[in-house]
Image (cartoon, grey):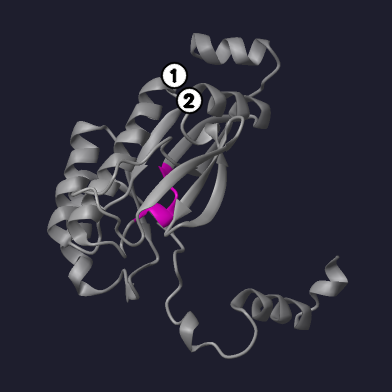
Amino acid sequence: MGEEKAKRFRSGCGCDGIDVHCHVVPSRFPLPRGGSAIRGWPSMVVSGDCHATVVIDDKPYRQVSDACWVAERRLEEMDRAGIELQALSPMPELFGYWIETGAANDLVRHVNDSIATLVAEGQGRFVGLGGLPMQDIDLAVTELHRIVSELGFHGIEIGSNINGVAIGDPRFHPLFAEVEKLGAAVFVHAVRPAGVDRLVGPSPLQQYLGILQTLGWRRLR
């Protein structure tokens, strides 16, 4: 048992859990290349002590705490939850698949560099899973090699579809071949589900809850 872990056990932490679903949001986002606004490009607005709001297209997307970018704060939360190790990955709305390719690559690299900083400050309790600009396979392969070979990440996080294209599509095979060569892990996260525009009636969530009720969800409460 390492000295840091031993200290946590002696203090009553009892940390031994592993959390593979942990998203990172940088404390700030640079301006897009050229300095002009780009649809889908995120920004951060301070919204209170230790919190900020991710803003996309001038609309608040999500309020997040500084545990998203401050290693010490994240480690404190992990200790309280009994988590020994976290796999850090981008918040899915930061994948940038829907942004112009060059700008998307800039965004992904910025987020990955932020993850790398957290990993470096994490006392050995973080591993990185980076994002890739999946709308351009050549750029995606280049970033894959950078995050694994240079940043030391253990794998990647990708969306369940890339702008409506299933990740099983042959166009992505060259990327997955490189992933296999590197022995990298792949974490698939749901993002902007394809086909939602074809649903008729209440929102998808309402329809899903309606199915649960039909299956007896009310009896389980």
Q: Is residue 184 left or right of residue 20?
A: left
Viewed as shown, does residue 6 lie left or right of 186?
right
- Disc count in the image? 2
Quarter of the picture containing the C terminus is: bottom right
Crowd rating for badge 2 (residues with CA inside 10 Å; few <14, some 14–19, many 20+):
many
Residue that appears at 34% across and 42% down: 111
Upstream in sequence: badge 1 or badge 2: 2
Q: Provide residue 90's location: percent of width, then percent of height.
A: 40, 46
Residue 162: percent from left, percent from top: 32, 68
Q: What's drawn in magenta, residue-wise?
A: 89-95
**In the visual, does 217 lie left or right of 185?**
right
113 w.r.t. 55: above or below: above
Q: Nearer the viewer, residue 120 or 19?
A: 120
Q: Which mark is residue 71?
A: 2
Tell me if 136 is positioned left or right of 84 in this view.
Answer: left
The alpha-carbon separation of the residues under discs 1 and 2 comes to 9 Å
Say which residue appears at 25% left-offset and 55% top-offset: 104
User: Is residue 101 depicted above or below 6 in this figure?
Assistant: below
Tag 2: residue type? Answer: Ala
Disc 1 marks a residue whose amino acid type is Gln
Other residues around mark 1 within 10 Å, as few (<14) / some (14–19) / many (≥20): few
Determine which residue is flagged by label 1.
123
Q: Percent position (x, y) of residue 30? A: 30, 41
